[in-house]
Structures are given as C-alpha cells and as structure tokens.
Amino acid sequence: MIHSTLSPVKPFSKKFFGAVNALMGRLIFIVGGARSGKSKHALLRAIEESPSGRVAFLATAIPTDEDMRRRIEEHRRKRPKGWATFEEPLEPEELAQKLAGKFEAILIDCLTLWLFNWFERLREGRSPPELEGALGERAERLVLGLRRAVDSGGATLIVVSNEVGMGVVPSDPYDRAFCDSLGRLNQLVAEAADEVILVCCGIPLRIKP
C-alpha cells in the first residue's frame, strides 16, 4: 500500500472567491414583476458579492408623490447601514464607471424607473414611435456604459428591472411605447449580462448562464 504524504486540499473560502470576483468583475441582471422579491434578492446578492461590505447603492427613483416617498424610505431602511447611497435618476452608468474601482459591488435599482425618467423627459413633441426610438438610443448607451464599468473597474454590478411583458397590453399608445421599450431594454441588458436571475413569487430562478 502506498501512503501519500500530501496534505488534503482545503476548499477555497468564500473570501477567496470574493477576491477573484472583484478582479474579474461581473454584470448580474435581476428581473421580476412588481413585489416579486427582486429587490430583496438583489440586496442579498450584493452582500454575497462584497465580503468587506463595500457596496454602492445607485437609486434611480424620483420622489414625485407621497406614495413614492414612502416606497423610497421603505427600501432605504432595508439596506445595510454601511452602504454608500447615491441618487442618479438619469445616468447611473456614468456614475457606476466612476465608482467601480472604489467598491466591490454596485447595485442599481431600478432600470424601470430610470427608463420612466427618460420617458417623461423625452415624451414632449414626439409620437410613440419616435419616443421608442429615442428611448432605444438611451438604452444602448446605458448598456454599453454598464458593461464598460464592469470590464474596466472590476466591481460586480447588480442591476434590477421589472418584467412587464407578461401582463395586459396597454390601450394607450404611449403606455405601449414604454412597455415595449422596457422589454427591449431588458433584452439588451440580459444579452450583456454574465448572469440573469428571474425572481418569481420570491423565488430566484437563474436563466443565464
């Protein structure tokens, strides 16, 4: 019988994989319906991706009414206190590129509100097809910027969006333009992402890779 003098190989620690992920950088896309649990899952993933707790939260919401202010405050209370919060309703991809070298994880929540902010800004004077074209150009710029932030800075970028394509088709042409634009935006982000998670009824389902 041959007795090996080699020591057993120890499994890599979570801290090791966190360091490797920080060097590589990844784009994680989390999508789901309203109150599906997507934001909760995104928070958990950000914690997992940042062993040291260096997380930047990029909020895209604009507090336009009391209900929106209440929702924003509700989400703020759920975040770990050590996270850095930035409000960027129009160009989160630009801010993500600046922050990528300073944080292990960057969480953008959410692209639905980001698109709506541009929808409101670009709507005046445009027909629904023209508006879709303008939003499509903004979507392409966003996705290129998100991918650039991941590839250049090494941080894990987690992006949240709503899946609205499974509901009733809106009767208003501008509402349809928004839903169609969001669907196309989600496709672009999913194509660029390293990992895509669909959250349904609070259950995360990996659909890519």
Image (cartoon, rainbow, N blue to C red):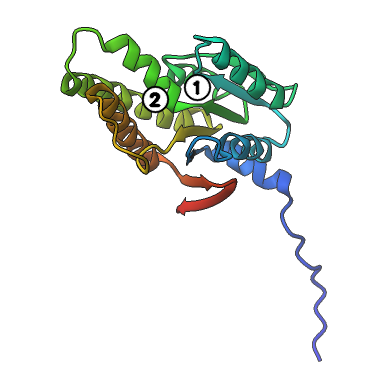
Foreground of the two, 117 or 56: 117
Can you say which quadrant of the picture contains the C terminus? bottom left
Q: Is residue 62 above or below residue 16?
A: above
Question: Residue 82, percent across and down?
Answer: 74, 22
Foreground of the two, 126 or 47: 126
Question: Residue 124, percent across and down?
Answer: 24, 8
Q: Is residue 77 above or below residue 184?
A: above
Circles 2 and 1: CB distance less than 8 Å? yes
Quarter-of-image position of residue 135: top left
* Picture disc at residue 96: 1
Question: Residue 45, percent across and down?
Answer: 62, 40
* Picture disc at residue 145: 2
Can you say which quadrant of the picture contains the N terminus? bottom right
* Residue at position x 48%, y 21% in the image: 97
* Residue at position x 46%, y 45% in the image: 196
Foreground of the two, 187 or 191: 187
| Amino acid at circle 1 | Ala
Quarter-of-image position of residue 128: top left
Quarter-of-image position of residue 147: top left
Q: CA distance from mark 2 to mark 1?
A: 8 Å
Q: Earlier in the sequence, mark 2 or mark 1?
A: 1
Describe the element under mark 1 as helix, strand or loop: helix
Q: Is residue 1 above or below residue 180?
A: below
Describe the element under mark 2 as helix, strand or loop: helix
